[in-house]
């Protein structure tokens, strides 16, 4: 009799319960006396007002201007946001970005060091800033704004030069301008003011291609490069950067002589109810994937194909359907049908870089349709991520993925051999999306794999420091990734690139859904992939959370001595959720490795680059009931907010770690998830914050307890159940 295959333990969320919040001992020690703060801030505000007064009225619509308020590094938590001060001064926070400050004092022991902080962009009438300067003269410690003043390190204006970005690879004279709006009201007057000002400088403003995300308006302009600094003088301009060209479609490998014929399967996909879309450069007129292609759509039917676009699109779609094609065997059966969208066309190949904006609108059209469970994007701007500013490609994608319903893979980029000192080897836009999965490439499939040298590296932009999220085989000169070429009798084309590793990873994600059904959410699939990922010692900047396993069965099965437990549900803002780890009735024999992965989706604030995600999850760990919490995800309670942001990443959308324990050291072990919500960096009332979706996967590996899976189910027979596969795979899954 064949041994029973164990899969996943589900319904674990039914074990969870809301618990009272822990008692927190508030820090009451004051860092400064009020006169010290006033003496530091008043001359700064005087200079701000002098510089604002010099601005022409065309730069300050309706008398509104923007200044920069930098927080003291000891006060950058969301609970320290200076709401009262801003309200009293009549100004609004319209955005933020990360900075570093070396204060003269701080809350920590030891000599102050240069530390992470936050600069707030605040907008108000110029008279509001004058009034604030005057108000400082009579301020006392018992004033209702004194506490907020204590949190401010500096006031200053925003120089035009600080708003300029460079990109030597971009076409001269084509710029993307991000204009900040004031939230909570109409900002039409700001838009009109900028349009009038830009046109007065003889810029062509393509507001027909503009994109508005949250409080940022991204608008392309064309004009004299030497006037870029002048356009940045407008008070509400956040950034002016050259428009990046499209990532190159040139293959890393050209077709080699003596290529073999492809052997494609005759069977239909394993599942017919999964909606998948490939957004790419189209398909050639003749191809062999029609049996698995549900629909082929041209985002712009009036335009011709982009050069090399159909070849690239076919290769990407081939990588999703079959993975790397074998030389001497039939290709594996696809897990699902697929739709292909040509979002890139000949228009993008013109000398007009603005056509790349059209591509983004085509992508938005697909996202807004909400038709697809799984999507792959293997194209984007040839632009490494920027720590200071969020790109419209990234923010738009994140906004549409915030509900956690769609699994989207993005190619990390093939610029891994770029100049490291200039950051040109870092993952490319929009791979810094916090709600999508950025995929890098490994150079081979066997255990000796390394990051492919061309594959872009991290770190990502905070939050989202672990980028790429995962690696999958992408091909190299050591081992090519073979895809289809055009024609009804296609040959194998040797390739390499993250363009192929991304859809290959998507294939594995779709494989989980095809085998296990809709009981496994998109976030749970993401958590399973990360939880099972393999490291090779290169470190996170190179490999992210690791390389995905070759065998899809490894993702959904629990072999002897292993139990994979899946929690899926929702988190309410401000609440503490106890997440117990189910154990056998008699505990665990010997050593046990505990691997835990938490994934959640979140709305984003693209104008607040230092506080981009609106949701964060802090996780405590108690291996023994009634004992002190221990570190698991390196989130130490006594750390400062800066340390937590830099090291523990509590605002990251993925948390993953593992620990080794003796089974005897576990007594009703449990994690505790605390969902924190913020809006534009400020604390937000729980009733106003969104409920978010989450997935939590815990893997227990106990080599001396082969039956741990069934032992846990026996102990929790009234609650837990095995998630059974809806189908038995009859396809080769080790690709």
Image (cartoon, rainbow, N blue to C red):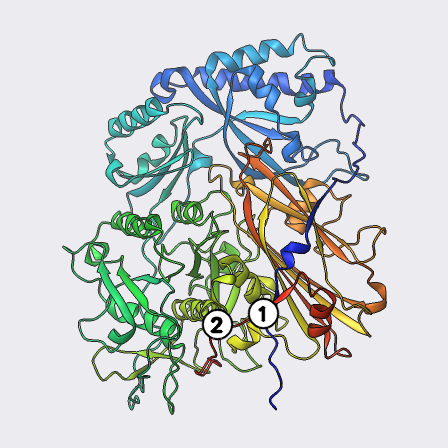
Q: Residues within 10 Å of mark 1 (few under 14, many from 20)?
A: many
Compared with 492, 528 (above or below) is above
> In this view of the protein, which residue sits in the foreground, 169 or 352?
352
Label disc, if present, on residue 333 of the rendered structure: none
Disc 1, SS: loop
User: Could you tell me which residue is drawn at 68 percent across and 52 percent down?
Assistant: 16
Q: Residues within 10 Å of mark 2 (few under 14, many from 20)?
A: some
User: Could you tell me which residue is drawn at 23 percent across and 60 percent down?
Assistant: 297
User: Could you tell me which residue is drawn at 44 percent across and 78 percent down?
Assistant: 476
Side of 416 where 631 appears, left or right: right
Residue 557 image-quadrant placement: bottom right
Q: Which residue is mark 1?
A: 533
Compared with 556, 467 (above or below) is above
Label disc, if present, on residue 726 of the rendered structure: 2
Distance of label 2 from label 1 (alpha carbons): 24 Å
- From this viewpoint, which residue is outermost toward the left? 302
Q: Check contact, mark 2 vs mark 1: CB within 8 A.
A: no
The answer to whether one can see residue 290 in this image is yes
Side of 79 where 687 appears, left or right: left
Q: Which x, y percent locates residue 199?
A: 24, 29
> In this view of the protein, which residue sits in the foreground, 337 or 39?
337
Q: Which x, y percent locates residue 526?
A: 53, 61
């Amino acid at each position: 009799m064949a041994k029973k295959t164990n899969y996943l333990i589900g319904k674990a969320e039914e074990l969870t319960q809301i618990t009272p919040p822990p008692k927190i001992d508030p820090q009451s020690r004051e860092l400064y006396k009020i006169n010290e703060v006033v003496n530091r801030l008043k001359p700064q505000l005087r200079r701000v007002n002098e510089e604002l007064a010099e601005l022409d009225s065309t730069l300050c619509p309706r008398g509104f201007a923007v200044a920069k308020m930098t927080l003291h590094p000891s006060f950058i938590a969301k609970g320290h946001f200076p709401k009262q001060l801003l309200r009293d001064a009549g100004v609004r926070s319209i955005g933020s970005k990360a900075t570093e400050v070396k204060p003269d004092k701080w809350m920590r022991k030891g000599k102050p060091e240069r530390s992470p902080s936050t600069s707030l962009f605040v907008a108000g009438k110029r008279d509001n800033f004058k009034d604030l300067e005057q108000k400082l003269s009579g301020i006392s410690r018992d004033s209702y704004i004194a506490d907020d003043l204590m949190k401010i390190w500096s006031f200053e204006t925003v120089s035009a030069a600080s708003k300029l970005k460079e990109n030597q690879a971009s076409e001269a004279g084509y710029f993307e301008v991000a204009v900040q709006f004031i939230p909570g009201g109409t900002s039409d007057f700001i838009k009109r003011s900028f349009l009038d000002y830009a046109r007065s400088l003889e810029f062509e403003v393509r507001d027909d291609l503009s994109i508005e995300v949250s409080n940022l308006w991204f608008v392309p302009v064309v004009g004299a490069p030497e006037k870029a600094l002048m356009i940045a003088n407008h008070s509400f301009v956040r950034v002016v950067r050259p428009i990046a060209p499209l990532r190159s479609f040139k293959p890393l490998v050209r077709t080699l002589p003596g290529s073999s014929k492809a052997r494609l399967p005759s069977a239909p996909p394993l599942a017919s109810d999964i909606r998948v879309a490939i957004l790419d450069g189209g398909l050639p007129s003749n191809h062999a994937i029609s049996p698995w292609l549900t629909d082929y759509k041209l985002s712009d039917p009036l335009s011709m194909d982009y050069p090399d676009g159909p070849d690239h699109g076919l290769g990407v779609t081939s990588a999703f359907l079959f993975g790397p094609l074998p030389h001497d065997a039939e290709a594996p059966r696809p897990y699902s049908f697929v739709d292909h969208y040509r979002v890139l066309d000949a228009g993008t190949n013109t000398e007009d870089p603005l056509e790349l904006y059209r591509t983004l609108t085509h992508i938005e059209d697909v996202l807004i349709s909400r038709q697809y469970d799984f999507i792959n994007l293997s194209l984007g701007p040839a632009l490494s991520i920027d720590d200071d500013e969020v790109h419209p490609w990234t923010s738009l994608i994140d906004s549409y993925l915030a509900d956690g319903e769609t699994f989207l893979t993005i190619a990390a980029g093939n610029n891994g051999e770029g100049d490291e000192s200039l950051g040109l080897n870092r993952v490319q836009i929009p791979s810094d999306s916090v709600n999508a999965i950025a995929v890098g490439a490994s150079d081979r499939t066997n255990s000796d794999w390394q990051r492919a040298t061309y594959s872009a590296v991290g770190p990502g932009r905070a939050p989202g420091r672990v980028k790429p999220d995962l690696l999958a085989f992408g091909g190299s000169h050591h081992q090519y990734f073979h895809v289809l070429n055009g024609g009804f009798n296609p040959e194998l084309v040797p390739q390499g690139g993250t363009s192929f590793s991304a859809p290959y990873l998507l294939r594995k994600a779709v494989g989980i859904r095809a085998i296990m059904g809709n009981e496994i959410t998109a976030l749970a699939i993401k958590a399973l992939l990360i939880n099972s990922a393999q490291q090779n010692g290169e470190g996170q900047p190179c490999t992210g959370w690791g390389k995905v396993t070759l065998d899809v069965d490894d993702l959904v099965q629990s072999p002897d001595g292993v139990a994979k437990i899946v929690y899926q549900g929702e988190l309410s803002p401000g609440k503490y959720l106890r997440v117990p780890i189910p154990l056998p009735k008699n505990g665990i024999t010997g050593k046990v490795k505990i691997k835990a992965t938490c994934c959640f989706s979140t709305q984003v604030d693209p104008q607040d680059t230092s506080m981009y995600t609106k949701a964060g999850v802090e996780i405590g760990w108690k291996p023994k009931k009634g004992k002190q919490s221990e570190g698991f995800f390196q989130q130490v309670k006594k750390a400062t907010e800066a340390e937590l942001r830099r090291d523990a990443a509590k605002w990251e959308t993925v948390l993953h770690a593992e620990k080794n324990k003796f089974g005897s050291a576990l007594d009703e072990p449990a994690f505790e998830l605390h969902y924190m919500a913020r809006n534009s960096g400020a604390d937000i009332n729980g009733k106003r914050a969104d409920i978010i979706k989450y997935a939590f996967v815990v893997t227990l590996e106990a080599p001396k307890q082969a039956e741990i899976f069934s032992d846990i189910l026996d102990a929790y027979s009234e609650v837990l159940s095995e998630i059974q596969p809806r189908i038995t795979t009859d396809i080769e899954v080790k690709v």
